[in-house]
Image (spheres, grey):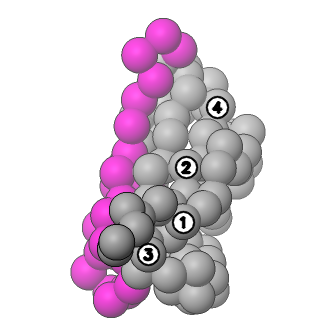
């Protein structure tokens, strides 16, 4: 079962593009360097342009925990820590799989 995480950040309008760039840095680094990272998307809220989501999928919870210890995420937080409100974890959990029989 894959492990899913959806994180919300609120950023000031003048920092939106900086935050998106930092989020994409984190996503690209995680996908390139962490075998347990399956998907990592940066999503802008349709109704609130100052709200950004990170939609992440891992092979397991352990892979997510490893992601949280890696250098890419540390650099991401250094880039956004002075202005971003978050992370607000909207959910963490396992994908529901159909039963086999």
Q: CA distance from mark 3 to mark 1?
A: 6 Å
Proximity of marks 3 and 1: CB atoms separated by less than 8 Å: yes
Residue at the disc numbered 3:
1
Q: CA distance from mark 1 to mark 2?
A: 12 Å
Q: Nearer the N terminus, badge 3 or badge 2?
A: 3
Helix, strand or loop for disc 1:
strand
Give the number of the mark in front: 4 or 3.
3
On-image quarter of the N terminus: bottom left
- At horizontal 56% and vertical 27% (from top left) the residue drawn is 51
Q: Nearer the N terminus, badge 4 or badge 3?
A: 3
Q: CA distance from mark 3 to mark 2?
A: 16 Å
Q: Residues within 10 Å of mark 2 (few under 14, many from 20)?
A: some
Q: Is residue 71 visible?
A: no
Q: Is residue 20 visible?
A: yes
Residue at the disc numbered 4:
10
- Which quadrant would residue 10 be assigned to in this image? top right
Proximity of marks 1 and 2: CB atoms separated by less than 8 Å: no
Residue at the disc numbered 2:
6
Q: Is residue 66 magenta?
A: no
Q: Is residue 37 magenta?
A: yes
On-image quarter of the C terminus: bottom left
Helix, strand or loop for disc 2:
strand
- Which quadrant would residue 13 be assigned to in this image? top right
Give the number of the mark in front: 1 or 4.
1
Q: Nearer the N terminus, badge 3 or badge 1?
A: 3
Q: Identify the magenta region.
A: 23-48
Q: Nearer the N terminus, badge 1 or badge 4?
A: 4
Q: CA distance from mark 4 to mark 3?
A: 30 Å
Q: Residues within 10 Å of mark 4 (few under 14, many from 20)?
A: many
Residue at the disc numbered 1:
94
- At horizontal 51% and vertical 35% (from top left) the residue drawn is 52
- At horizontal 47% and vertical 60% (from top left) the residue drawn is 96
């Amino acid at each position: 079962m894959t492990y899913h995480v959806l994180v919300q950040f609120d950023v000031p309008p003048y920092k939106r593009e900086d935050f998106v760039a930092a989020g994409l840095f984190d996503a690209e680094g995680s996908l390139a360097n962490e075998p347990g990272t399956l998907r990592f998307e940066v999503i802008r809220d349709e109704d609130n342009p100052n709200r950004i989501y990170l939609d992440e999928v891992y092979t397991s919870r352990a892979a997510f925990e490893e992601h949280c210890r890696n250098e890419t995420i540390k650099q991401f937080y250094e880039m956004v820590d002075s202005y971003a409100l978050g992370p607000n974890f909207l959910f963490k959990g396992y994908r529901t799989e159909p039963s086999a029989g």
